[in-house]
């Protein structure tokens, strides 16, 4: 049975995994970047990141002092618990995780900058934020995606004018590269860059953030979009910004694009950066109450 207490415990566990253990796809590409790097300064930065990853995993302590804001992606299947049970369980889990992991209290009122309802518990008005989708699965899946401020603060959005395909792609590429150059070392590169194209304004940014959840190295299923991802990744890495903005071959670990159909008069484009500590962890909760950590 899926209960509030079970969801609370799972939330604490996946937050701990996300905060302390870098996903293997990200770690592997960081290792490759280190092996291929020729700049000594860049190699020092990448080596420090890899040592940090090792120590965080061994000690089960957060990879970064900025432990992010609590974002979650929940996939609902058949026979799920009441959404109120899911949300209250996640909320209580974040509260407990803040004290036990521990997590830095990052959540504040947007205007007054005072602590939210949970003060030092990382809970408040609409926080934690939960994204829902429905799928044909047994039970539900919860993915924790703690997002740091440094990478979030350089997000970018624009509404381009509709144009023929080649011109549109050129303008999108230019917008992405301009955002990368303006961001420079602020998002703690090498980054993963999520690009959302289409939908409405809010959909485009949601697509950009969801693009960051894809495994590094996995291309878009549409061959045309896949080519744009590869071209952008090469162009971004040719900027020479490099690890932590100190120069080098690897400015981005990958570029992921997600798309949606849009209005005939619109071409919304959004960019969401993820720092090198691309934290995420998930679990599947079966209707029986069994938990599988993914």
Image (spheres, grey):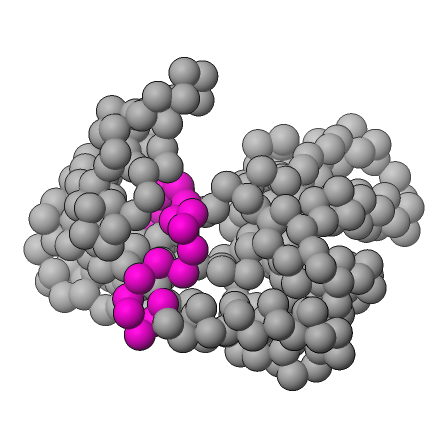
Q: Residue furthest bottom?
A: 35
For the point 35% across and 21% down, the residue is 114
Nearer to the camera, 59 or 116: 59
Image quadrant of residue 271? top right
User: Residue 243: x percent and y percent?
Assistant: 66, 63
The quarter of the image holding the C terminus is bottom left
Check the image and report above or below for 167 versus 108. below
For the point 75% across and 70% down, the residue is 249
Side (left or right) of 7 relative to 246 = left
Q: Which residues are magenta?
A: 56-74
Check the image and report above or below for 234 versus 209. below
Does residue 196 appear in the picture of this structure?
no
Q: Residue furthest top?
A: 112
The quarter of the image holding the N terminus is bottom left
Q: Magenta includes 70?
A: yes
Image quadrant of residue 264? top right
Nearer to the camera, 246 or 206: 246
Check the image and report above or below for 167 versus 200. below
User: Residue 100: x percent and y percent?
Assistant: 18, 52
For the point 31% across and 25% down, the residue is 115
């Amino acid at each position: 049975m899926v209960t509030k207490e079970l969801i609370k415990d799972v939330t604490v566990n996946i937050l701990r995994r996300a905060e302390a253990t870098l996903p293997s796809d990200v770690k592997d590409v960081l290792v490759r970047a280190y092996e291929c790097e020729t700049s000594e300064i860049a190699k020092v930065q990448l080596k420090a990141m890899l040592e940090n990853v090792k120590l965080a995993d061994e000690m089960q302590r957060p990879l970064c002092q900025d432990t992010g804001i609590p974002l979650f992606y929940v996939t609902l299947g058949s026979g799920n618990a009441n959404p109120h049970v899911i949300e209250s369980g996640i909320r209580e889990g974040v509260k407990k995780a803040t004290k036990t992991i521990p997590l830095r209290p990052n959540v504040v009122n947007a205007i007054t900058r005072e602590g939210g309802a949970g003060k030092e518990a990382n809970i408040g008005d609409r926080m934690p934020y939960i994204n829902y989708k429905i799928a044909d699965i047994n039970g539900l899946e919860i993915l924790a995606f703690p997002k740091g401020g440094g990478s979030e603060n350089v997000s970018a959005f624009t509404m381009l004018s509709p144009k023929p395909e080649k011109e549109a792609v050129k303008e999108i590429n230019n917008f992405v590269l301009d955002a990368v150059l303006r961001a420079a070392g602020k998002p703690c590169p090498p980054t993963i860059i999520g690009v959302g194209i289409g939908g409405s304004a809010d959909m485009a940014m949601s697509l950009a953030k969801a693009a960051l959840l894809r495994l590094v190295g996995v291309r878009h299923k549409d061959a045309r979009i896949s080519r744009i991802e590869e071209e952008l990744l090469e162009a971004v890495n040719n900027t020479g910004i490099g690890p932590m903005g100190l120069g080098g071959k690897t400015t981005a670990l990958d570029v992921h694009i997600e798309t949606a159909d849009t209005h005939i008069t619109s071409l919304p484009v959004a960019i969401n950066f993820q720092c090198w500590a691309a934290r995420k962890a998930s679990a599947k909760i079966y209707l029986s109450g069994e938990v599988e950590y993914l």
